[in-house]
């Protein structure tokens, strides 16, 4: 055998050895079965299955907890800092955009361009109203008589134009109702509440910051209620506020309204960002009358 032929064979063998080694190393590095640790358990992989979606990752809910007056350049602006006690009043405000000008184009959500809420600092007072907007973008929210205390006022809306078009917002400001406030202790957590002869029962194991189903069942005199009428394009509207800071959450209904025969069971998409007690306000309508049931729900 010539020396040149021997050299070629040696080079070929070396190349084959290098290739085999590279394949072996690649196979070890890309194995889908992780190596066992000293404890005999597999280490956690960075690509493990994601957890349940949190409120911040879900696009269907308004961003944040509503405790700020400004978000992404949009502001709930008002010159009103006090409201009278014991009589109806109108709260005037505007929603200004990133350019500082009042926003006048809004997307309709549950039959309204803007939803407005008033909640007392101890969560015992609640109002959900729908303001009217003047051509210049000034809104006026009609409020029933308020009791002396600090109240937080929320506006939820979706701009139809501008940089925030299509995004859901919830903003708030506080007002003072003069007088001597008499705070009440928040009722204990319960899955049942009664209002106007109706019994509301909640079913669902909620965890903070995670999406969970929540079921509401409505009965009267021990019998299922099946004559719920549409209210805001659904059979019930559910709003929640966190004890201590009044953080806001709107629990979206998944039960669609189709005629005056809703009930007795309604499904909701529940996402409550914080652990602790939440005060829930369920609004539903029968025979043209709106009912509001309130109950406390504890979230782990």
Image (tube, helix red, strand yellow):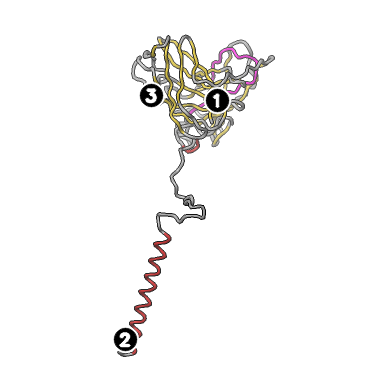
Magenta-drawn segment: 135-157
> Tags 3 and 2 in contact by the CB under 8 Å rule?
no
Q: How far is disc 2 from disc 1 in space, using C-alphas?
A: 85 Å
Q: Which residue is mark 1?
A: 278
Q: Residues within 10 Å of mark 2 (few under 14, many from 20)?
A: few
Q: Residues within 10 Å of mark 1 (few under 14, many from 20)?
A: many
Residue 160 position, x and y percent, is 45, 31
At horizontal 63% and vertical 13% (from top left) the residue drawn is 85
Residue sitting at the far right:
180
Secondary structure mostly taken by the magenta-highlighted segment of the chain: strand
Among the two numbered marks 2 and 1 on one chain, the one whose residue lies closer to the N terminus = 2
Residue 136 appears in the rendering? no
Residue 114 appears in the rendering? yes
Residue 5 shows which numbered tag? 2
Q: Residues within 10 Å of mark 3 (few under 14, many from 20)?
A: some
Q: How far is disc 3 from disc 2 in space, using C-alphas?
A: 81 Å
Name the one closer to the observer, 191 or 266: 191
Task: Locate the N terminus by quadrant.
Answer: bottom left
> For residue 84, which quarter of the picture?
top right
Among the two numbered marks 3 and 2 on one chain, the one whose residue lies closer to the N terminus = 2
Q: Which residue is mark 3?
A: 255
Residue 20 position, x and y percent, is 37, 70
At horizontal 52% and vertical 17% (from top left) the residue drawn is 294
Residue 133 position, x and y percent, is 50, 21
Q: Of circles 3 and 1, which is in front?
A: 1
Q: Is residue 152 magenta?
A: yes
| Secondary-structure class at tag 1 | strand
At horizontal 46% and vertical 9% (from top left) the residue drawn is 197
Q: Of circles 3 and 2, which is in front?
A: 2
> For residue 189, which quarter of the picture?
top right
| Secondary-structure class at tag 3 | loop
């Amino acid at each position: 055998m010539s020396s040149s032929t021997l050299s070629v064979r040696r080079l070929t063998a070396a190349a084959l050895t290098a290739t085999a080694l590279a394949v072996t190393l690649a196979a070890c590095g890309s194995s889908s079965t992780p190596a066992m640790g000293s404890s005999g358990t597999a280490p956690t992989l960075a690509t493990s299955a994601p957890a349940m979606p949190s409120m911040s990752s879900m696009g269907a809910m308004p961003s944040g907890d509503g405790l700020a007056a400004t978000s992404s350049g949009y502001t709930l602006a008002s010159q009103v800092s006090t409201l009278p006690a014991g009589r109806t009043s109108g709260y005037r405000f505007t929603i200004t955009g990133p350019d500082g000008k009042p926003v006048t184009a809004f997307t309709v959500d549950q039959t309204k361009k803007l939803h407005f809420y008033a909640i007392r600092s101890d969560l015992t007072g609640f109002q959900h109203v729908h303001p009217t907007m003047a051509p210049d973008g000034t809104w006026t929210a009609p409020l029933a008589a308020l009791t002396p205390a600090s109240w937080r006022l929320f506006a939820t809306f979706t701009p139809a134009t501008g940089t925030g078009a299509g995004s859901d917002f919830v903003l708030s400001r506080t007002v003072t109702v003069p007088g001597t406030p008499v705070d009440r202790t928040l009722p204990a957590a319960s899955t049942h509440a009664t209002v106007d002869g109706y019994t509301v029962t909640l079913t669902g194991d909620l965890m903070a910051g995670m999406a969970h189903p929540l079921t509401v069942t409505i009965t009267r005199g021990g019998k299922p209620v099946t004559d719920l009428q549409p209210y805001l394009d659904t059979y019930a509207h559910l709003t929640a506020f966190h004890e201590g800071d009044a953080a806001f959450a709107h629990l979206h209904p998944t039960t669609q309204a189709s005629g005056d025969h809703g009930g007795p069971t309604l499904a909701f998409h529940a996402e409550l960002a914080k652990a602790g007690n939440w005060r829930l306000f369920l609004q539903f309508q029968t025979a043209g009358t709106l009912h509001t049931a309130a109950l406390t729900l504890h979230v782990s």
